[in-house]
Image: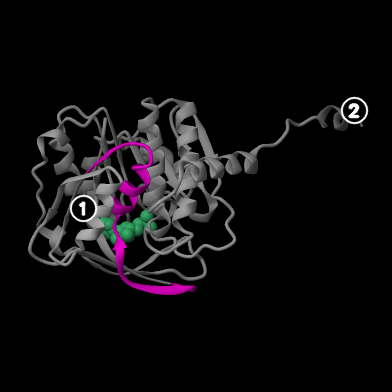
Amino acid sequence: MSLLVVGSVAFDSVETPFGKVEETIGGSATFFSTAASYFVPINLVAVVGEDFPEDQIDFLKSRSVDCTGLHRVPGKTFRWRGRYGFDLNEAITLDTQLNVFGDFHPDLPQSYRECTRVFLANIDPELQLEVLKQVKDPQFVAADTMNFWIDGKRQELGRLLSHVDMLIINETEARKLASEANIVAAARAIMSMGPRHVIIKRGEYGALAFTPEDVFFAPAYPLEAVFDPTGAGDTFAGGLLGYLCRRNKVSTINLRQATVVGCVMASFCVEQFSLDALRSLSNEAIEARFSKFQKLVSFEPLELLEAISVQ
Ligand code: AMP
């Protein structure tokens, strides 16, 4: 069964200390769909303008992303401009142009309405809710958001959160949404807004998964060269939810594995600009990096305490 996603499909212009790209392919739904497509088929809802290249849509289709719900309308595609300093954890948004997203009210294709698993990628919370309302019987709904919407549409976001099972959000944004400095307290506060599961993305420091039954930490992969962190958060969400949907059950074990799969996919994403590193990964490469994560955090049980207490 497919996973339905709504979010931005965009042109990104990004500066990092290592280089600069103008109007490359980006968007929360683009990164998410590409990453998740390694695990499950995707039904994509978004809008692009006349300027969006057809070959990029063909690429998504080639990765089992159903693009029936990707509308092309007169006007310009969504554009985002951002900059990263040496601290690659935090993007500074320089410009956001909603363009064709400003007035987008999709009517979902019939087949999309039957999807039971939904990811509301980062976009206007009113649009996230509008899409969710058209889904007949949503069984598992996950969402992401960012400062832009927390600042601009807090009430709408609050309404949305009461329908969400899992929020996947950056550390800084979690603090802002919850008005809490402590990240554990912030996760608890967000849980009280609706989502049973709160996943906090911590950039190069990995991710924390909070559920009523469990707290889990996954590190980020210690890469020597991080080229462009844009899209890492959406790619993380794509890996996590793609894997979870493939397992077909949100158990503690599956969610722990899925959080690591999210970190695996994000670790590929940041190695190149835009979507480039995610275009043709092999299953073997994904599995090999997953094993490296296992090795990275495995250690033996403590044995010395008795000896210390005798002294
Ligand atoms: P991240 O995965 O957090 O690095 O997200 C990066 C992507 O988010 C970029 O490709 C942008 O096009 C997209 N983006 C940035 N701002 C917004 C926004 N306000 N709404 C939706 N998407 C956005």
- Residue 124: mark: 1
- Residue 310: mark: 2
- The residue under the point 51% across, 46% down is 285
Residue 135 position in % (x across, y down): 16, 33
Left or right: 63, with 290 as reference point: left
Residue 280 position in % (x across, y down): 40, 51
Neighbourhood count class around disc 2 (C-alpha, 10 Å): few under 14, some 14–19, many 20 upward: few
- Judge by depth and name the residue closer to the eye, 109 or 136: 109
Residue 62 position in % (x across, y down): 28, 48
Residue 43 position in % (x across, y down): 22, 41
Q: Earlier in the sequence, mark 1 or mark 2?
A: 1
Comparing marks 1 and 2, which lies closer to the viewer? Answer: 1
Q: In the image, what residue type sits under mark 2?
A: Val
- Judge by depth and name the residue closer to the eye, 14 or 51: 51
Left or right: 27, with 188 as reference point: left
- The residue under the point 23% across, 54% down is 58
Residue 36 highlighted magenta (yes or no): yes
- Judge by depth and name the residue closer to the eye, 81 or 285: 285
| Range drawn in magenta | 16-43
